Image (cartoon, rainbow, N blue to C red):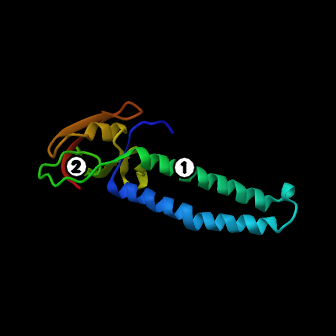
Amino acid sequence: MDNKEIILTPEGRQRLVDELVFREGEKHDEIVERIKEARGFGDLSENAEYDAAKEEQSQNESRINEIRQILSIAKVVESSSDMHLSVSIGTTVELEDKGGKRTSFTIVGTTETNSLEHRISNESPVGAVLIGHVVGDQVSYATPNGRVREYTITNITR
């Protein structure tokens, strides 16, 4: 993982901390137990259960190291109580297009994105365009296929 700045919301940081606790505790213990059990099946050179458990152990350790790295360099953005919010990481932005269709996104750091939950990265085309704008601003961006989308910011919340 490169040392590029990673930005997290407080909730995103907490999710990573919770995952780390799970992987270092319960998940680790479960994998160790599976390895012990698989060793009891005999010859380790042809033991698929043992190989699978060792592979899972390796993947778990890799994810633990990745989470530790993220947490060590991540910048957590704190909520502000500013009455005149501008779009920033951690805010939810409500948008309306010219046809009256409404949509909303929560702006998050790159490690927290989830399109199914409308959580977009501050580095995505939409997220980058929205950063710094306030309610009433009109923004536009080009989609990957070249189509230009235009929106008006109707609400910003934390």
110 lies left or right of 19: left
Mark 2, residue position: 100
Please say if 138 is above or below 100: above
Amino acid type at image mark 1: Asn
Q: Position of residue 100 (x, y in %)?
A: 22, 49
Q: Position of residue 5 (x, y in %)?
A: 39, 39
Mark 1, residue position: 65
**Mark positioned earlier in the residue sequence (1 or 2):** 1
Q: CA distance from mark 1 to mark 2?
A: 46 Å
Q: Nearer the viewer, mark 1 or mark 2?
A: 1
Which quadrant does the C terminus fall into? bottom left
Residue 88 location, quadrant: top left
Mark 1 Cα-neighbour bin, 10 Å: few <14, some 14–19, many ≥20: few
Q: Secondary structure at mark 1?
A: helix
Q: Secondary structure at mark 2?
A: loop
Q: Which residue appears at 36% of the width and 52% of the height? A: 118
Taking the image as drawn, is residue 136 in sight?
yes
Mark 2 Cα-neighbour bin, 10 Å: few <14, some 14–19, many ≥20: few
